[in-house]
Image: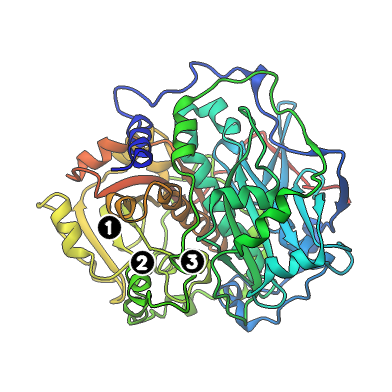
Amino acid sequence: MTKELEAILAYHQASKHKFKSYAPGPHRLDLRLKPDSFLNYHGTRLLNLEIWSDEQTKAEIFPTYEQAFSPEKLKPSELNAKSISRLFFDSFAISAWKMAEGTKWPLRVNPSSGNLHPTEMYLLSGPMKGLLKNPSVCHYASLPHALEIRAEFSQATWKLLSSGFPEGTFFVGLSSVFWRVSWKYGLRAFRYAQHDIGHAIAALTFAAAGLGWKTSLLLDMSSKDIAALLGISGEKGPEKQGPACLLAVYPAGKTCTKSRISSGVIPDFKNLSWKGIPNSLSPEHVQWVGIEDAASAAQKKETDYLDKREESNEKLKEELKFNLQAVSSLKTSSFRNLLNLDTVPLREVIRKRRSAIEMNNSAYLEDEIFYAMLQRTLPENNPIFNSLAFGPFTHLLLFVNHVKDLLPGLYIFLRKPGEKDRFKAAIRPDFLWEKPKNCPLDLEFYLLMEETLDSFAAQLSCKQRKAADACFTACMLSEFEEPLKRFGAWIYPYLFWECGILGQLLYLEAEAYGLRGCGIGCFFDDPLHDAIGLKGLEFQDLYHFAVGYPLPEIGVIALPAYEK
């Protein structure tokens, strides 16, 4: 076992919540140190982006939410100032301000644990009509909804950077400031920051789909090269940004076959004149050595898992990539057509997404909607999963509380074929493994235990009442030991990214159907494993997500995201 893998496993175990003790965290919230949730680079040139009012967004009937799942059928938007404004407005911008008892705070399109937002976003692009005269690296500032030009570079460098990618491609980079989350959550913050990266990847992918674009995660890139491209290589101290990932964004009708940018372009970025000084987020800091160790261990080196297209590694690629042929053999149920999502406007769903604070425990979800939401989480023909090169690794353990024609109890939903025997061997032998009578044939959905478990669901989710009041709460069980052994420590964040992507999908599915969701990062890890008889590290519980009907927030006033 490598020292990096040892460090990741040590972090994972140390950051688990237990019934008798939570993972190490601050004893109290020191509001004096609360980090600024907005990063800005002082001294840069600011490019203000176009803003749409709530009324304008509501008036946009097209594209519909259903059309977002077939972006290749939409005419791709021209790459210009308006389309880039729309992309960031629908993925990372402020979605609303709220006010209660004299306190005002912003919400964003991309959710974040505790609304702390450790994720920073960057645009790498060639010249762009109405926006960029030269190829540039820009930081996206959500508070003013603007781009900050951090560096400009030559057309020759851009040609090398974009070589081999479809015409019209640009790139979006993501990074994390772990201090923003550790201020409140302590050691577990590294996990939450990775959830947020997954949510951000999905938010970008949905926004891109609305413009007729797709995203592709450049998974063969090294962390070091990503940092160089984003201009964050030299950052030090507790407020430094950790490089996460780089995504190519391109017209949906085209195919992206590359999984990294040529390493030959990296020296050009190291020699650029980077503009701007980041604002200080806190006057003082608390150091979490465990987070530093995990972040260091998870740094990725350049790989060639997906990029050796001309060499004889077809067998390796087949082993690494999910067997899509097996998934495509599944039949498609007719629920989606019955529920008429092709009349629901995509951008209204995206921008009104909220986390449910409290849920109505007397409201029931139609079983057709429930099954349609499960079906949507399958990788088959779902472009939201195109950004993931490997997997799926995650399956859903479900506490079903209030779904019509389904007995309350514990269920499991397997997101790839051929896993039933493996799971039956891994968890309690007395589970039922019965398929409900009304379940579509194409879904591997099984009742494990018939019992009212709403209170236990809440207990496992750090006693959060919404897990009991929700129509259902999903616990995301990820394959764990095998991917870590196969790929190395760098895959650890990726496992959380997949969970975050699933969470964002469930958020939007809930909104589209008139419900509401809520991501739950606080849960008792091993107690859940013990409850289902799961031993060792073959599977691990990495994220919880509740879906139900929200109760109105009393005394909270909603205000527009931006004043036009």
Q: Earlier in the sequence, mark 1 or mark 2?
A: 2
- Kind of residue sitting beneath label 3: Phe
State the residue position of label 2.
320
Q: Position of residue 68 (x, y in %)?
A: 60, 72
Q: Earlier in the sequence, mark 2 or mark 3?
A: 2
Q: Earlier in the sequence, mark 3 or mark 1?
A: 3
- Kind of residue sitting beneath label 1: Ile
As measured in the structure, the alpha-carbon distance from the residue carrying label 3 to the one carrying label 1 is 21 Å
Q: Is residue 350 or residue 153 the one in the foreground? A: 153
| Marker disc for residue 385 | 3
Task: Pick out the residue farthest to the left.
Answer: 430
Tell me: residue 16, above or below residue 337.
Answer: above
- Specify whether 188 is left or right of 272: left
As measured in the structure, the alpha-carbon distance from the residue carrying label 1 to the one carrying label 2 is 25 Å
- Kind of residue sitting beneath label 2: Leu
Judge the density around disc 3: few (<14), some (14-19), many (≥20) Cα neighbours within 10 Å.
many
Residue 273 makes an appearance in the image:
yes
Q: Position of residue 33 (x, y in %)?
A: 65, 20
Quadrant the N terminus occupies: top left
Residue 349 makes an appearance in the image:
no
State the residue position of label 1.
412
Tell me: residue 547, above or below residue 286.
Answer: below
Tell me: residue 331, above or below residue 490.
Answer: below
Q: Position of residue 560 (x, y in %)?
A: 78, 47
